[in-house]
Amino acid sequence: MRDGSSRVSDRPRLLPPNDPRQYDDLADEWWRPDGTFAMLHWLARARAALVPPAARPNALLVDLGCGAGLLAPHLAGRGYRHVGVDLTRSALAQAAQHGVTPVNGDATAVPLADGCADVVAAGELLEHVPDWRRAVAEACRLLRPGGLLVLDTLNDTALSRLIAVEIGERLPTVPRGIHDPRLFVDHRELVAECARHGVDLRVRGVRPGLVGTLAWLLRRMRSGGRPQPTPAGRAPRIRPTWSTAVLYQGWGVRRG
Ligand SMILES: C[S@@+](CC[C@H](N)C(=O)[O-])C[C@H]1O[C@@H](n2cnc3c(N)ncnc32)[C@H](O)[C@@H]1O
């Protein structure tokens, strides 16, 4: 197990930005809610809040770029079979331990049937995919008519590059080098692409709550950088905000 204070920059090998092998190097971090992937836990909770209980037996939720399955606990009791698609085998192995059916594959060529999914989730995925349009086409293809697409990603703006990369990757909530800002996704282009594939996507900006995040950072500083378990119910919340310029959620139903 990695020491809690270690950072991506401590890793033995230096990889290019967005290299998927970073997720292998960080495999021990996924399920430490106060570790390097802390913010993914906060975002998973907010994403799950967009998913209603399943409307029929055996409803299927396909989680594109599922990582280690952080969405799974937030969907408990909603009645979905949770299938996760990811490039990274080490992450999928952990997802499987959390009840996710793992599919090792690329979100731009998903080995699942057209219209199989009641819900497709793509959390913090598109900004990592060189051909995000292809991944969107696949997400929409997988949805049955009336099915729901939910996603969150980073916008292609100077502010996003500043906050998510220049500042964010220096904080303990985001691994350094995990993003390639050239892949960030313009929200208007995303809405247009979804519409082309039959999904009318609504978007809204989101951000971590300031008070909760400051309290979280303070707790970390006081513990000398070694993450302490966040007291129950006190993990920072992801809140809607007026601007989509940095982080945003999208949701929309596939037309019949
Ligand atoms: C930032 S993590 C998000 C993981 C998860 N959705 C979450 O929110 O906890 C991005 C994930 O996308 C995966 N990924 C990146 N490119 C991918 C692709 N083309 N196809 C499938 N998975 C991909 C990575 O392996 C990694 O697990």
Image (cartoon, rainbow, N blue to C red):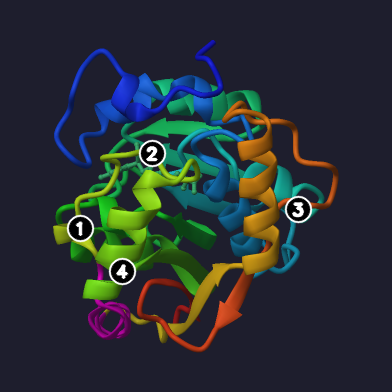
* Residue for point 28% across, 64% down: 162
Residue bearing the label numbered 3: 79
- Asked if labels 1 and 4 touch by Cβ distance under 8 angstroms, the answer is yes
* Residue for point 35% across, 22% down: 24
The secondary structure type at the circle numbered 1 is helix
Please identify, in this view, whether the residue under mark 3 or under mark 2 is nearer the observer: 2
Which callout, 1 or 3, points at the residue further toward the start of the chain?
A: 3
Q: Is residue 177 left or right of residue 240?
A: left
Rounded to the nearest angstrom, the CA distance separating label 3 from label 2 is 33 Å
Please identify, in this view, whether the residue under mark 1 or under mark 3 is nearer the observer: 1
Residue bearing the label numbered 2: 175
* Residue for point 35% across, 47% down: 169
Residue bearing the label numbered 1: 181
The secondary structure type at the circle numbered 2 is loop
Q: Which quadrant of the view contains residue 115?
A: bottom left
Residue bearing the label numbered 4: 160
Check disc 1 and give the amino acid type.
Answer: Pro
Local packing at callout 2 (Cα closer than 10 Å; few below 14, some 14-19, many 20+) is: many
Rounded to the nearest angstrom, the CA distance separating label 1 from label 2 is 14 Å
**Which residues lie in the magenta part?**
185-196
The secondary structure type at the circle numbered 3 is loop
